[in-house]
């Protein structure tokens, strides 16, 4: 008998609803293992506020070592009102920035697909959001989030933004490669009318584009992109952009799908290894109530299967199961229409498992 494939997954649930939604994603991975005959050895690690209360550090060395020893990381969310002092030197969010930097995860993929059953969940008109299918390709380890911040007394503060040509090149290549497997269009978003970094970005993306003559490239200024994403979102295929713009625009895309609770993400480096997380945060306001939507976390697990483990059939099966559950009308409160019955976080996880194994 051939040996069952076995994968090591580091599970960093973090804070707030991160814990609740990751429990459901783990449930789904176990079901994938049963159906497809593979094994996921999951090991928990502490990050964020949870790690700060236990160890004083948002990203303890043990959590980082665990990630390094794993095939992939399943990440929940970090952010904790107990550590929300903006003056504090240590904050839960540093865990995420630290992981991205230390693990070399320079590329963040955030696919945005409007599910046909959810066109009415968006505040944007159904005829605008129907059929939206885009992916934000966000540079993740450069730019202003990794600058040299300085606070000068109480009157002045400085953040710096830096990009190198090499940093732009590697993310641009990925953007074009992804576009090749899709509808063949890249919209590169920058602020080249103002920022030096954006001019370097635009020049570099143009040079890279010459290697992909089969892909159409357009440039768009970030302010215009913010508008067009809502006015004509179907025109976007691959939205390629730098760290901060990608952070902001990807939250905007959640409006198209109706909820932050629907959007997964993958953070990738050079190899297969990656970190997978829902784009939503720890949502302390609804934590512990069992009402969080676990679908973004479950869809992140599907991305993990696809990108880090090369298990496309399994990834597709999870995505199909989510579609089946939505088609059957099951909703957590964030995506429910007025008067519609809702299910809890763990019921939603169970429904996806049932759809997967039947
Ligand atoms: C995200 C989050 C993070 C970011 C924070 C928590 C550091 O907003 O993943 O989009 O800004 O990148
Ligand atoms: Mg963000």
Image (spheres, grey):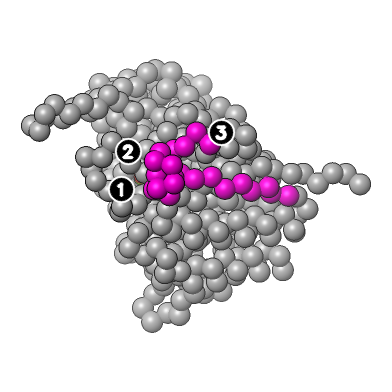
Q: Which residues are magenta?
A: 39-62
Task: Tell which of 162 and 235 is nearer to you.
Answer: 162
Q: Circle 2 — which element?
A: loop
Tell me if residue 136 can be seen: no
Task: From the image, tell me which residue sits under label 2.
Answer: 90
Q: Secondary structure at mark 3?
A: helix
Which of 141/111 is in front?
141
Label 1 and label 3: CA atoms lie apart by 24 Å
Horizontal relation, residue 355 to residue 218: left or right: right
Circle nearer the N terminus (3, 2)? 3
Q: Residues within 10 Å of mark 2 (few under 14, many from 20)?
A: some
- Residue drawn at 27 percent across, 48 percent down: 84
> Which residue appears at 8% of the width and 32% of the height?
155
Is 284 one of the magenta-colored residues? no
Lower sequence index among marks 1 and 3: 3
Disc 3 and disc 2 in contact, CB within 8 angstroms: no
Dot 3 crowding, Cα within 10 Å, few <14, some 14–19, many 20+? few
Quadrant position of residue 68:
top right
Q: Are marks 2 and 1 in contact (CB under 8 Å)?
A: yes
- The residue that disc 3 covers is 65
- Tell whether circle 2 marks a residue whose Cβ is less than 8 angstroms from ligand 1: no
Within the image, what quadrant is residue 151 found in?
top left
Q: Residue drawn 33% across and 41% down? A: 91
| Mark 3–mark 2 distance (CA, rounded to whole Å) | 20 Å
Which residue is identified by label 1? Answer: 83
**Which percent across, then down, holds residue 160?**
25, 25
Residue neighbourhood size for the residue with mark 1, other residues' Cα within 10 Å, grouped as few (<14), some (14–19), many (≥20): some
Q: Is residue 279 above or below residue 97?
A: below
């Amino acid at each position: 008998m051939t040996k069952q494939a076995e994968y090591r997954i580091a599970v960093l649930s973090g804070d707030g609803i991160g814990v609740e939604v990751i429990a459901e994603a783990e449930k789904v991975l176990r079901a994938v293992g049963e159906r497809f005959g593979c094994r996921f050895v999951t090991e928990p690690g502490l990050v964020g506020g949870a790690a700060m209360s236990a160890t004083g550090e948002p990203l303890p060395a043990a959590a980082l070592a665990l990630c390094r020893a794993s095939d992939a990381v399943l990440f929940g969310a970090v952010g904790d009102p107990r550590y929300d002092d903006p003056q504090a030197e240590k904050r839960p969010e540093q865990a995420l920035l630290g992981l991205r930097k230390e693990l070399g995860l320079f590329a963040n993929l955030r696919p945005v697909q409007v599910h046909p059953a959810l066109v009415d969940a968006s505040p944007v008109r159904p005829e605008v959001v129907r059929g939206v299918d885009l992916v934000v390709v966000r540079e993740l380890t450069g730019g202003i989030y990794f600058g040299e911040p300085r606070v000068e007394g109480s009157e002045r503060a400085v953040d710096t933004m830096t990009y190198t040509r090499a940093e732009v090149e590697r993310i641009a290549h990925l953007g074009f490669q992804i576009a090749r497997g899709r509808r063949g269009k890249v919209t590169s978003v920058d602020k080249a009318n103002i920022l030096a970094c954006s001019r370097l970005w635009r020049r570099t993306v143009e040079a890279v584009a010459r290697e992909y003559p089969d892909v159409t490239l357009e440039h768009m200024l970030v302010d215009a992109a913010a508008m067009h994403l809502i006015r004509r979102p179907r025109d976007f295929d691959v939205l390629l952009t730098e760290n901060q713009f990608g952070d902001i625009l990807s939250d905007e895309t959640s409006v198209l799908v109706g909820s932050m609770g629907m959007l997964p993400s993958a953070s990738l480096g050079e190899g297969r290894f990656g970190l997978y997380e829902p784009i939503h945060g720890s949502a302390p306001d609804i934590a512990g109530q069992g009402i969080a939507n676990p679908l973004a976390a479950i869809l992140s697990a599907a991305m993990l299967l696809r990108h880090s483990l090369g298990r496309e059939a399994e990834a597709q099966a999870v995505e199909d199961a989510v579609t089946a559950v939505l088609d059957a009308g099951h909703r957590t409160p964030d995506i429910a229409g007025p008067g519609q019955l809702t299910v809890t976080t763990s019921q939603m996880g169970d429904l996806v498992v049932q759809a997967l194994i039947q």
